[in-house]
Amino acid sequence: MAKKILIIGAVALGTKAATRCKRLNPDTEITLIDQGQFISYGGCGMPFYISSEVDNINALRATSANVVRDPKFFTTVKEIDCVKIRTKAIEINRQEKYVLTENMDTGEKEKLFYDDLVLGMGSRAILPNIKGMNLGNVTTIAGLEDAEKIRKHCESGMKHMAIIGASFTAIEIAVGLAEIWNIPCTLIKRSPRMLPNLVSSTISDMIKNDLREAGIKVISEEDILEFVGDENGNVCEVVTSKHRVKADHVVLAMGVKANSELAEQAGLKCNPKCGVCVNEYLQTSDPHIYAGGDLIAIKNLITEKEMHLPMGSLANRQGRIIGTNIAGGNPQTGMETFPGVVGTWCMKMHKGTVAGTGLNEDMAKKAGFDVMSINMEQLDKAHFYPEKNMMSLEVVVEKKTRRILGMQGYCADGMAVKARIDSMAMMLQFGKPTLHELSIAEVSYSPPLASAMDVFNTAGNVADNIVTGLGEFIKPEEFDKLFAERETNNYIFIDTRAGQAPLEIQKRYPDYWFNIPLETFSERIDTIPQDKNIAFICNSGTRAYECLLKFKKHGRHAVNSSGGMQAMKKRGKKY
């Protein structure tokens, strides 16, 4: 008798598991069910359909050969035995090995029996409990229907959108509306920082400035109190703890929560914060039930603790693993494993792309590590090549062991910063990389694509200098504070750049800002006042570091602003 496989959820993980299993073991009898109307679509592409960068919504449902992945596609092309849409799973009976389902249109109930069950129910939007939630044009971005509704409102004359939350999806929608539809957009969030669990305050400032330059307003550290409606029952205003924001469309993007209730009711082990618990084979506490994607708690390979990481790319990779295992394993290697994640991500914005992997400084400290976070700036390509961009990289390193725990970056060239972050992700996923290993990591080189001393390697070198204690470096926001308090902290600021730019700043602040280029620093070192605190700055931090070493050799003490004026510029700071 053919083995019966039942899969609940058919957006990413479920369809991948089904097709992989069928390829390995064509004799399996596979049933796919999903409570939605649409299956197997690229949910992460919805912001780009809303923006109109993706013109047709069916493109999100289609293969690379432009064939729409509907139920008929899976039953005829992929030979999946049965695909049921608009079908909700309401109970799992583990003893008799069936799932009770309900047709959402007719109310008809049916028992579907299984030998192995796959749970891929994903996640749902976190919703606030406030007045006005039922007003028209207050939506989530949970599925294609939501994306279609928002796009149609853009086309019919939306005047102002408010987005509650600052998730990847929230930011991507805001950027699209501002860039392409020219619709004013306000992001409203509780945290003072952007992506606080993923980036430092330095890169957070770069994200804020990028959004600001796109014309997007960001309101931070405020609670949503209510949504106000107009005479037609549509939202017209958002009331926060400090503001009243006009908005004829509101998108709720405050994050997601795993749809783990069905699993909990079935007695499967769950993490209340992260989702359904699984082992390395992606089996739940019942070995005949597998789970993956947004639904599960997954092991963080750095902290060795469970986390929730809702990403379409992760669901697809896990779907293949599950498909292999329910088919009986890989013909060569047997049951396949998914050991865990390090948390790798990227996001296209207005002028740049931000990306990261592993832990940021705050999350590393929460996990119990004694860390430093070191930011730096360098060109992404050879300095003599005409087309190039300054890349920001930040390395999170454990002080005592010099072990790297994470890396984040921002650059105008999205592919360039993604390549460096992906390189670090591989190092974190399959080892415990150190600063020395980052410094000597072998990466490809050609002037149109990279520097001979790649920015990836240089990030290790800069971090090594700081951890070793070759000089005292301060972060850009610390330099801001020193400069803001210059009238009381006895600091003067020495700009070691050549050219006109530092002279212009010196004119504005003649008592505090002085220009001593690196080329003349040694001969002018004695002109630097002995009774002042000294802070060095240059374009990227390199020239100032050279001057810092010369200064140190003369028995003097100073600090250097890491990332230099480039980091200041990206953060929107002007002097």
Image (tube, helix red, strand yellow):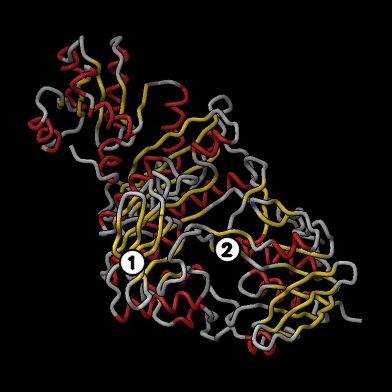
Q: Residue at x 49, y 83 (%)?
A: 58
Q: Residues within 10 Å of mark 2 (few under 14, many from 20)?
A: some
Q: Nearer the viewer, residue 546 or 223?
A: 223
Is there any visible trace of residue 381 in the rendered image? no
Horizontally, residue 93 falls left or right of residue 65, namely right
Instruction: Tell me the distance, in whole angstroms, between the alpha carbons under discs 2 and 1.
Output: 28 Å
Horizontally, residue 1 falls left or right of residue 212, namely right
**Where does the image place residue 445, in percent across and percent down from the top left?**
42, 50
Residue 521 to residue 261: above or below: above
* Quadrant placement of the N terminus: bottom right
Query: What type is the residue that disc 2 sits on?
Result: Ser
Residue 29: which numbered mark, if any?
Answer: none
Of marks 2 and 1, the one in the foreground:
1
Residue at the limit of the structure toward the right, as seen here: 1
Residue at the limit of the structure toward the left, as seen here: 507
**Where does the image place residue 282, in percent across and percent down from the top left?**
74, 59
| Quarter location, residue 512 | top left
Please report whichever mark, 2 or 1, sits nearer to the chain's N-terminal start: 1
Residue 77 to residue 378: above or below: below
| Residue denoted by label 2 | 313
Q: Residue at x 37, y 74 (%)?
A: 234
Q: Residues within 10 Å of mark 1 (few under 14, many from 20)?
A: many
The local secondary structure at tag 2 comes to: helix
**Where does the image place residue 553, in percent across and percent down from the top left?**
31, 13
Query: What type is the residue that disc 1 sits on?
Result: Met
Q: Residue at x 32, y 70 (%)?
A: 248
Q: Nearer the viewer, residue 381 or 36?
A: 36
| Residue denoted by label 1 | 161
Q: Nearer the viewer, residue 358 or 465?
A: 358
